[in-house]
Image (cartoon, helix red, strand yellow):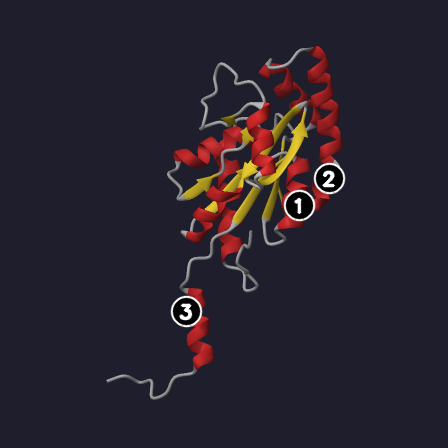
Amino acid sequence: MSLITETDDEVETLYASLNHPRPLLVVLSGPSGVGKDATLQAMQRRNTDFYFVVTATTRPIRPTEVDGVDYHFVSMGEFAEMITQGELLEHAMVYGDYKGIPKKHVRAALASGKDVIMRIDVQGAATVRKLIPSAVTIFLTAESEEELVRRLHERKTEDAGKLKMRIATARQELRRIVEFDYVVVNRESQLEETVDRVLSIIQAEKCRVDWTPVEI
């Protein structure tokens, strides 16, 4: 026999909202060399049910990269067409190359109830914050400037001039840390701990009383 003799529409609505998926749009950003790619790859290895956004770029593909996995590598003409058709959530020039986030896959993932994780530079993160105030922004950084410079040197992906520019840009980007919701220090040889912190942030955000749907 049911103990409930009458219903309260407001309470029923509240319970319904608590049991409905609460997808998030999570922005993982930070200077070059802090380990954004490594963090995302480690999250994927844990079989987390996230949609990981693949950025479109006009940058030439590197020997270790896979088209459609690391980036969607497109020509300048193709990128221009994506801008004209309004297919990009945000786009910007980064170190002489264009990068942008395709909209349609983000919308589809959110509609299915999946959390969307996007890895973008600090400049792009600022654009996303303006367009989508409910986005959760996480700033990833190394434990020190010395460690960051060491990582950039070890990548050996640019000539001396471009490397110097990346280091100078990283210093400027670090000053924008106050624009983000969270900061996670990705310490050397502690990648799994970094992932744990990112996942903890996501779980906490999904439990917020003031959670609001993402609108794109």
Give neighbour class at mark 1: few <14, some 14-19, many 20+ (Cα, 10 Å): some
Q: Which mark is residue 180?
A: 1
Residue 184 visible here: no
Task: Tell me the residue that label 3 is attached to.
Answer: 16
Local secondary structure at mark 3: helix
Is the C-beta separation of discs 1 and 2 under 8 Å?
yes
Q: Amino acid at mark 3?
A: Ala
- Where's residue 146, x and y in %? 69, 23
Mark 2, residues whose alpha carbon is within 10 Å: few (<14), some, or many (≥20)?
A: some
- Give 200 or 123, whichever is nearer the viewer: 123
Give the number of the mark in front: 3 or 2: 3
Neighbourhood count class around disc 3 (C-alpha, 10 Å): few under 14, some 14–19, many 20 upward:
few
Residue situated furthest top in the rendering = 159
* Relative to 75, 41 lies left or right: left
Please determine whether, in this image, residue 213 is positioned above or below residue 125.
Answer: below
The residue furthest bottom is 5
As rendered, which of 127 and 180 lies closer to the eye? Answer: 127
